[in-house]
Amino acid sequence: MHLEQRDSCTLISLASSQTLGKGDLCGAPATTTGYRDPGYVHTSTLSQLIPGQKYCYRYGGDDEWSDTHRFLQPSRTYPFSVIAYGDEGQTTTDGTTIEQDMPYSRATADLTLALLEDDPTTQLVVHFGDISYARGYAADWDIFTHMNRDVLSRAPYAVSVGNHEADYPHSSSYQNGSESGGECGVPVQLQFPTPQPALNKPWYWFASGPLFIVMMSTEHDFRMGSEQYEYIKDTLTTKVDRTLTPWVIFTGHRPMYIDSTNNSTGNGDQTVAEELRQHVEPQLLDSGGRAVDLTLWGHHHSYQRMCSSFAGACIQRSDLLDGETVYHSPSYPIAVVVGTAGPLPSTNVQLSTPAYVEKVSFAHGVAHIKVFNESSLHWRFVRDSLNDTIDSFWLLR
């Protein structure tokens, strides 16, 4: 890879190459009708990048090189914005994709690119689970990456696994389902390297600008005493420095708070939410001296904003100030479900809305979070089709 720093000389960064075969996957259809040789994935680690510096790059070798792409290395300057969502999937322009239940995924890719282009403060994209919905059909990963190629080449793109990446019987999936179509987390970890502790341990943290972000896996054991539990505990209590990263965001795929009628044993929405509140939520109360600011979730294909909550109860509701929704120094995290990036809506909400829910929408869209300083954060939920804001709030410290 050639890495070109603006107004400087050309640098070269070597890449490593990896691939996968049927033996690396867990079962059908990933190992049967859905399999094709993926070729090689080439990974290059770029070190000593200067925050706030713009870079352009090409990839290739010998006499074959890609077009030139550009990105901005995130910096701790204000304002700093991030786009966040779960559950995107993929679709083709001519409707020939294997899956036909994700009609809004391309609109999400277009909106994300527009936000990156129109707002220069937007320097990061976070996608918490159910990335491509390939579900064992390797060609769908190609459709997804091609659909998002301009987004992926423009900004850091952090992902975590959902049930449609990780779950398969007898794999390390905590839920032990079959919704990955036999992928059991292998293709996503190959194509989207992260600073996770090891292969098949897809949980990690990173700092970007003034944000400290934790990406957990709800598909692997997170209960007290598990390796992931200890990792989350150590990360939040020892790695967060609020003087460097004043804002802490915690993400996972299956939600900790949700308005849903799914109470199924094992992996039902409410069943998993209760387990997350029992084992993970208490750890969110100490992240650099105070509670995590925001928790972001997907899985349920809806937009849901909660009040500041703990142990399944609403502790502090938002205020309305001069027409703006405001949370003033909440003692507990604000949970938001943004599983709205592609598939058809999940409309299975309860007849009586839980007390911790403040807003529900079935529109498709993404969250756009803008941090203005160490004490002021603004949230927007932006609808795909019209690029308009249908929910917003301020979090003030």
Image: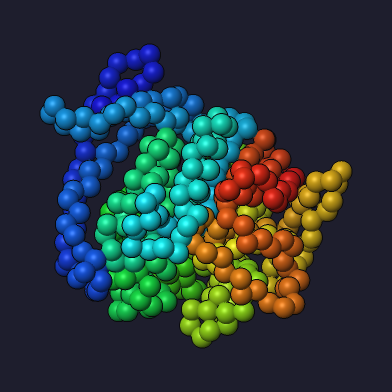
Residue 391 visible somewhere in the drawing: yes
Residue at image coords 43%, 40%: 151
Residue 227 visible somewhere in the drawing: no
Q: Position of residue 220 (x, y in %)?
A: 41, 70
Residue at image coords 63%, 40%: 370
Query: From what the image shows, is residue 364 above or below residue 346?
Result: above
Q: Nearer the viewer, residue 76 or 340?
A: 340
Q: Looking at the figure, which quarter contains the C terminus?
A: top right
Residue at image coords 73%, 46%: 394
Q: Position of residue 238 (x, y in %)?
A: 52, 52
Most extreme residue toward the left, as rendered? 62
Most extreme residue toward the front, as rendered? 94
Q: Position of residue 73 (x, y in %)?
A: 44, 31
Instruction: Judge left or right: residue 156 versus residue 182.
Output: right
Instruction: Judge left or right: residue 280 versus residue 153.
Output: right
Most extreme residue toward the right, as rendered? 322
